[in-house]
Image (tube, rainbow, N blue to C red):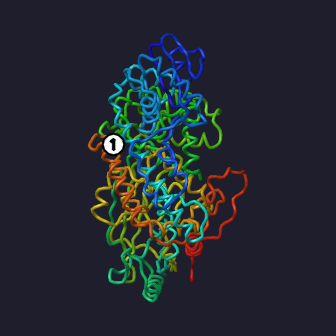
Amino acid sequence: MHRLFLCEKPSQAKDIAKVLGANRRGDGCWLGSDVTVTWCIGHLLETAPPDAYDPRYKRWVLADLPIVPEHWKMRVKAKTASQFKAVKRLLGEARELVIATDADREGEMIARELVEHCRYRGPIQRLWLSALDDTSIRKALAALKPGAETFSLYHSALGRSRADWLIGMNMSRLFTLLGRQSGYQGVLPVGRVQTPTLRLVVDRDRSIADFVPVAYWAIEVALLADGSSFNAQWRVPEDACDEQGRCLNPALAQQAAAAIGNAASARVVKLRTERMGEAPPLPFDLGTLQEVCSKKLGLGAQETLDIAQALYETHKLITYPRSDCGYLPLSQHGEAPAILQALGRGDPGLAELLPHLDAQRRSRAWNDGKVSAHHGIIPTAAALSLDRLVGKQRAVYALIRARYLAQFLPNHEYDRSQADFTCAGQALRAVGKVIVESGWRRALPEALTPGKGRETQPAQPLPALREGQDCAVAGVTLKDLWTQPPKPFTEGDLIKAMKNVAKLVDDPRLKQKLKDTTGIGTEATRAGIIQGLLDRGYLRKQGKALAATPAAFSLIDAVPRAIADPGTTAIWEQALDMVQSGEMSLEEFVGKQSAWMSKQVQRCVSLRISISAPASPAAAAPWKKKRKTAPRKASASKGSAAGKRAAKPTSRT
């Protein structure tokens, strides 16, 4: 056999084999002339458990901790052993290997761990795919990378895997054993990523529970000018408002409302109109797609990923979905005319939009300097009739397509007018907005248009005003309002918080370090982390919102703060980026992780903890076979119940 292509999944292998002309089915492979295409089924190997290093580790004993392997071992996964056997045989026969797994660090590890385990020593090339339609596959085949160019991705993924093992195996054993000392008989899973993620929700729920609403007052004034009505807002005197410009003094607000109500008119004292422009939002990265789908479509993070993966693998309609980047390479701009034509053919509903598109337009999205290993998620030229897509798949595809189409439309432009008034000694302000050019918003349905939250009042057109003009006072409304607590996390909000963890860190030096990191977890793993916490009963859903269960509160209170600190996890991700770039060796990274973890074990071994039972039976006994039964109902946590009460708007009129 001359050349072997090693893919990540059977479906991916079938697509590549078809382009290569490898049409004969073999044992765990597709066969062609001097080429064979085989596949993994995710990871065919896994890191060996502690008892593979010493049989005594089958029993969980505090005295055996920490467990730090001197020489790391891998073992074949039992469920996919037959495919491993086929891949091992094919690697032994190959003269040249082309790694064709997913183009990310996890995909690199899936292939490289097999190369190492099976002792393949031949030449290696890398197929770097961003889409699975025939055109994209042919383009990638014509531009194979040297294997050495992506090898550092493997060490980064291996570092991540070993760090997860060290923290998971040691800290989970430690806290499970400490829990047993206090009478709790279940397993307490502690993870490098899942525990800090859980703390984000626990902290948010506590801030909701501890929130004390504060009453404030606002005044809305209806004004008339030349037969047109519009609204203005009372501006609280600087010496009588809080940091957000709100009036906390009811007597002052009532006095101002009475004075304005008794006035016949308000005079324009200052008028300003400014032309504003908004560039189109970038194409989606996975995290942003999950955030928008959660907010606008009510989809969970894992559900969004599964749909995007199907659009990529099964339908070939979008590019690689597990991207952490929304920018596009300049070289990709040349494919725009063909993609736009294909999108128009696939959906007659775009007929009104197509004349406004300019395939030569180059938005800020096209920027080689901003593109990471992957570019933004965009449609491919393999567009098909949308009738073949239904329900949620169609909705997610429409979102991805709309973001791409927006790149070929002008900026959204509007005139923002601000009119300041004086009325009975009180200051009023009216803000108006008139759209001049719809621009890229033509591509996005109004409900899905991103808002920046800069305006506190809904957009209204102002009539033609002039300084010195008097406008009649048509009505006055005194509003009795309450400050609102933080909102509970949705899955989309939590994904965003995991990405932008620097905003949640108080230490200014650490905050600066974290600004350019990948945050907690990666685009490919965040949805699975959240789903795992739901499955284990540490989180539960209340409509779209996520709530921590009592077990989550007690677990976060028990583990060392450093392990649950999102900043610590983000620093580890930053170190993994250094491994990928060659600034730190794999051995140095794992050595630091081992030393840090060992120190945490020593500090915690004498702790006394109290743990509430998780909400799911599976969490208490994860070694037992899962049954398809409904989870038991858990009592509401203090944070969730109090937050629910505080979140209801209240009026005291």
Does the rendering let one see residue 463? no
Residue at 32 percent of width and 63 percent of height = 272
Q: For residue 406, what is the image quadrant?
A: top left
Whole-percent x, y for residue 547 in the image: 57, 64
Mark 1 element type: helix
Q: Position of residue 599 (x, y in %)?
A: 36, 61
Kind of residue at disc 1: Leu
How crowded is the residue under tag 1: few (<14 C-alpha within 10 Å), some, or many (20+)?
many
Give x and y (percent) for residue 263. Answer: 44, 83
Residue 535 versus residue 157 in the image, above or below: below
Tell me where residue 329 sits by quadrant.
top left
Q: Quadrant of the C terminus?
A: bottom right
Question: For the view shown, which residue lies furthest in the top direction?
Answer: 33
**Front residue of 347 and 427:** 347
For residue 341, above or below residue 171 = above
Q: Residue sitting at 41 percent across and 50 percent down?
A: 68
Q: Nearer the viewer, residue 613 or 234?
A: 613
Task: Check the image and report above or below for 28 versus 157.
Answer: above
**Where does residue 489 sit, x and y in percent of width and height?**
52, 61
Task: Classify residue 222 as left or right of residue 237.
Answer: right
Q: Identify the residue at horizontal 54%, vertical 72% (top origin).
A: 610
- Where is mark 1, residue-wise? 586
The residue that appears at 29% across and 64% down in the rendered structure is: 508
Front residue of 542 and 581: 581
